[in-house]
Amino acid sequence: MNQILVIAWREVTRLRKRFGGGASPLAVLVLLAVLSGSAYFLRDTVSLGSGLYRVGVSGDVPPIQDSRFAVMKVSAEEGKSLLDEKVIDVFINGADVISRADDKSQYAVRALKQYMEKEELVRVGNSFAEGDAFPLRVGINYLSAEQATGPNDAAKPEEIIIPSLTPPPAPFAQVLITLIYIMPITFISIFFTSSFMDEKINRRLTILLSAPITPFQIIMGKMLPYAIFALFSTTVIAVITKANVPLALAIFVPTTLFIFAIYLMVPLFYRTFKDTTFIAMLVTTLTTAYLIFPAMFTNVNDLSYISPLTLAVKMYRGEPFGWREYLFPSLPMAAIFGFAMFAGTRMLNEEFLMGYKPLTRKVSDAIYLMLAHSKPTISVPLWSLLVVPIVYLTQIILLAFATNLPVRLILGFTLLGSAMFEEVVKTVGIVVLAEHGVVKSARSIIGLSFLSGLGFLIGEKLLLLLSISMVSEARVAGALFGAGLLLFIPLISHFIFTAIITLLRIKLRFPYIIALGIGTIVHFFYNVYVLRGGF
Amino acid sequence: MIPFLAVVKKELASVIRDRTIVISILIQLFIASFSSALLLGMLSLYDADTILQFGGAGIKIGVVSSDNVLGSLMSKRGLQMVQYATLTDANDAYYRGEVLAIVDTPQDANGLTEIKLYLPESDTVSSLVRMVIQEPLKQYENVLREEKGIDVRYTDLKGKPSTSFEFVYSVLIPMLMFFPAFVAGSMSVDSITEEVENNTLQTLLSAPLTLNGMIGAKIVSSVIISILQCIAWLTLLQLNGIAIQNTGWILLLALIIAGITSTSAALGAVLLKDRERSQFIYSLMLLAAAAISTLLNLSPITAMSRLAIGDAYTSGWNVVIFAAFLVGLYLVLSKTSRRLLI
């Protein structure tokens, strides 16, 4: 523990030195102030687009203060001729709205309608008594799933709304708030990443590693200041946005760990500075998309629970959620953190960090370093078991990707993609070990294939136990994780696919891509067969 | 000139050799397709028009009513209405799966009109129903207001759903045109600070090349990479049937913005000399610049979407403003570049 604190302190000193001289902290503060100031002014104009439509107004028209419209005052005749010349898209003459028949003009009318509706409500609300201005009340009752004795036997208490003042549920506003939590953590990751890059450039890592400290302590020490910052910023944001602080922390701690875990990979894999930029970009995009995208579907689809931001959205809406909903996104994230920590400690050595190699080579070296830690009979199944959460997250991203495709192709694409990713994960360990000469005989390849399939199956079923009730609505998820209760057939099939690929690659010297392709196709047809109710 | 071209060539070659640029291109494709998926998702899940267009006939709503104003508003909206005499009948029909939701008779309560809406417990279906029923409810509210002598203006506007249009021209096109420019800035920080931190700068300068020439070459190579991506995206967008006007000006604007980001990034790198701080300041600068230019009403994003739409008041002059800014910025850089050697 003491060593971790020493390294953490060294990290703080490093940052202080960096920012003590040239770039005065004042400049950063000024920039941040400008940023938050402009964010404050722009908060109402987050609607899509600015200055997209040109509108001519004449006579008594309420002021149009929506960034989408560029407004100009014209006379009545001028307005009509400008509209005909397609210079303006809509002409508002008093209470009349004149448009053309073409698409752009019609889009402008719809956008104008949305805006005017709001403005008129404000006007009506201000100039008339409330009962007259808002004469309609709608009581919303929820009917329970089973028919009960009377219609008033509601599942939830009645909710009374005024239609024009109550937009239908859409979580975007809250999703944007939850994004604010993520921003500082991604920003601070630049420094976390740089910390390792510094050691590498100055060749101090060797000295550090020869000291009586473990790589684990080095990583933890370097992470500690940033983790404290992340906790602090989460607390501050929660306080400012009047959220429940302990709950916000509970939601965002696994998320923070997840983001750090992913960013830890950046300095370990980079070769040139540009690599760092691109890998960091990849990491930011994927994590943001993974966190934000599902949260947009809060209350629309249960799969949205894969993102912890969904929990945060619920928190802001004051809706309750249970342990199961909490663990569903949090456990995989915590597991990925643990996995990344282990990978980091194995890769933190001079030889791995310094060489310039193709990225694929670097990744396979990394896997070798992780597996060579113990005997193949232990490390291979353990690898397959531990990467299951990553497989699972990737498959869900694949599913989200697939929604881009025509409906008929969605299922096929997802099944093929997931089959391929599963096969990569199960075979890569054995193939890498064989390349380093650790595994040679056909017998041991077959044995390891079996163990790898077994490890994967155990991981898969453990995860299934946790998530079965959550994703029960999605039949596809059931097929992906093999919801079938029979364990024997999935085990054998996992084993066979893995064995096909590893034997083709190692014994018959097929290129890995082709071996993988063959195994994937067999796996794909098996999945299709299962989905059709084969077993 | 030849050493200058040699540096440009070396930069481009190293980008190709690293292969990680592929990541950046994939990310753009990912963001573009993801955001259209998002849009599609939003359209189908949050946009009542789209829901009605594709599944309107499938949404059956039970009405218990003698007053048919709301009912006719709902059928005008494209919803399928089923009339029931009493709430109990409607309730039975709901549990037989004949209707998705029930709207009860409007009742008078102290001068207010009250309607009871019965929705299924499932979040998915009930939010769907609430979305499609929103518009008729609002229209009904306006009818009630009129009865009380309150005139609400602009209620008869229709138009076409504009979300998709707004998204393509104000988000998708500017994003695809400017994202390469942001990357170009990061790349010029990387390639300048890498020479400093790996102590290769002096060696490079022993070639017949000035410091400004070296920095200029690095900026030019980043800009070349970014403009190649822009050309590819524009072609892809047009292949997808998105009409884009003023392509020449658009590419020029994208080029100039890439020049501005790379030059300002290089300026940061010259002053700070290490990657960590330069990248940090560069990302802050990007955010601040985006915010400030929007506040000053001089946003390149607006200019870009207006050019793409073919706005009557937007022309090459809007591009020239940014070009002038780029020239100014480059002059500042060439005056300060010596600090890299100190």
Image (cartoon, helix red, strand yellow):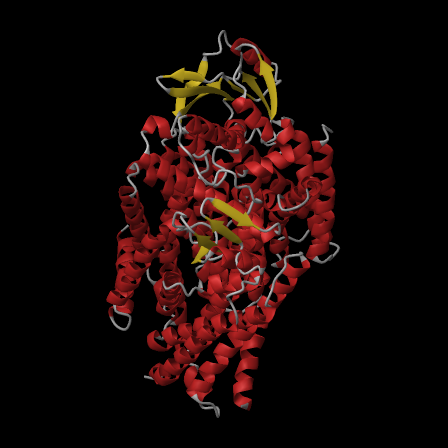
Q: Is residue A516 left or right of residue B297?
A: right
Q: Provide residue B41's location: percent of width, then percent of height.
A: 56, 42
**Residue lying farthest front?**
A77
Please tell me whether residue A535 is drawn above or below residue A188 in the rendered image. Answer: above
Count of number-bearing discs: 0
Q: Could you say which is closer to the camera, residue B325 or residue A445? A: B325
Name the residue: 49% across, 66% down.
B183
For the C terminus of chain A, which image quadrant? top right
**Residue lying farthest bottom?**
B208
Q: Could you say which is closer to the camera, residue A499 or residue B204? A: B204
Q: Provide residue B35's location: percent of width, then percent of height.
A: 54, 50
Q: Is residue A430 left or right of residue A347?
A: right
Name the residue: 60% across, 64% down.
B245
Q: Is residue A152 left or right of residue B99?
A: left
Q: Provide residue A227's location: percent of width, then percent of height.
A: 33, 50
Is residue A273 at all visible to an observer of this figure? Answer: no
Q: Is residue A111 left or right of residue A183?
A: right
Q: Provide residue A278's location: percent of width, then percent of height.
A: 50, 63
Is residue A70 at all visible to an observer of this figure? Answer: yes
Please tell me whether residue B156 is drawn above or below residue A89 in the rendered image. Answer: above
**Quarter-of-image position of residue B340:** bottom left
Q: Could you say which is closer to the camera, residue A285 or residue A368? A: A285
